[in-house]
Amino acid sequence: MTTQQFCDTIVSFAGGGNMATALIQGLIRSGFQGGNIRLFEPDASRAQALHQQFGIVTAPSNTATLNGSRVLVLAVKPGIIGAVLREVAPHLSRDTLVISIAAGITLASLTNVLPPRQPVIRAMPNTPALIQAGVTVLCPGDHVNEEQRLLGETLLKTVGDVRTVSDESVMDAVTALSGSGPAYVYLILEALSDGGVACGLPRDMATWLALHTVQGAARLVQETGQHPGVLKNQVTSPGGTTIAALKVLEEAGMRGTLMRAVEAAWRRSRELSGPSSGH
Ligand SMILES: NC(=O)c1ccc[n+]([C@@H]2O[C@H](COP(=O)([O-])OP(=O)(O)OC[C@H]3O[C@@H](n4cnc5c(N)ncnc54)[C@H](OP(=O)(O)O)[C@@H]3O)[C@@H](O)[C@H]2O)c1
């Protein structure tokens, strides 16, 4: 698919909240014309604001966005996805790729409500998508062809990095690591800043240092391709300050705590997306 073909695709959104806004912004930045993006959002003032900001077409219902649309992005809260699916199902063409970004909603629960052989992709983005720095894992359902898979990947790439998996069971782990992960990093940033303040730094300077340290360290891992343990060893001189701090972190079980935190989120995601979740 050429960039021009991608930008000429008609994309519909059910829901115009945070994630839809991020995706619409990503599409516009990638060269989409607002006229090729359709949206139904029940909050009229929000819909109007998105129309004014991006020139997108707002519609009076979810079904009114569908005619000729190549993609329908379900960007509503998991609790109402069933109602939206029942609303759109009778009006969907088999040529329309449905992409659900709803956390914990399985492919089976989506396809149960949609017409037989409807192409569906389950996607798990995260909130840095709001500044085009997200990471998304996609899991295409059985009836998604190669072109539609590429279309889904290209669409989500407008808000960050994308990987595609075929085994849906990993989506709970994805939710636990990258979906919930920004909150872990915020907590770490807050604690580092508190530590700086405890040592006498002004708050704004402590937060600024914490932020740039986390950002810079992450970029160094990414750009050098070095194992984080190797980079850690490089900044740990014998008898120095860093090893004194690392000893405290190891004694407190920081690695094990982070691992157990991710596992707890994984277990919770499995409970929520399990058969008794009622979605
Ligand atoms: N935010 C994240 O970090 C994140 C990460 C990964 C995945 N997700 C998933 O992304 C989805 C959207 O999350 P969000 O944070 O963007 O939520 P959000 O800001 O609450 O957006 C959802 C929007 O859907 C609208 N809506 C309600 N009923 C609707 C209907 N029948 N048809 C069409 N739109 C309807 C809501 O309008 P009203 O407010 O007027 O009800 C709201 O504007 C969720 O399923 C979530 O699990 C979110």
Image (spheres, grey):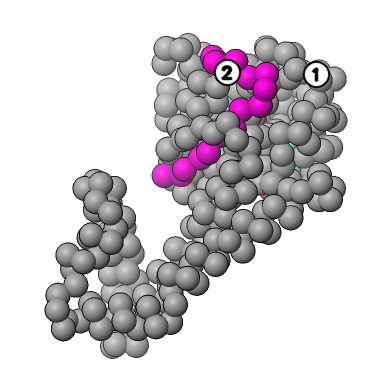
Type of amino acid under label 2? Gln
Q: Quadrant of the C terminus?
A: top right
Question: Is residue 146 part of the magenta span, yes or no?
Answer: yes
Q: Residue at x 81, y 46 (%)?
A: 275
Which residue: 47% across, 25% down? 154
Residue 267, position as x, y percentages in the image: 66, 58
Q: For ligand 1, give the image quadrant.
A: top right
In x, y percent, where is residue 193?
36, 76
- Magenta stretch, residue numbers: 133-148
Name the residue located 71 percent from the left edge and 34 percent from the top edge. Answer: 107
In the drawing, what numbered circle is on residue 116?
1
Q: Is residue 234 left or right of residue 200?
A: left
Seen at 32% across and 62% down, the residue is: 214
Looking at the picture, how far across and down is residue 140, in whole percent?
61, 28
Left or right, 216 with reference to 34: left
Q: Which residue is mark 2?
A: 148
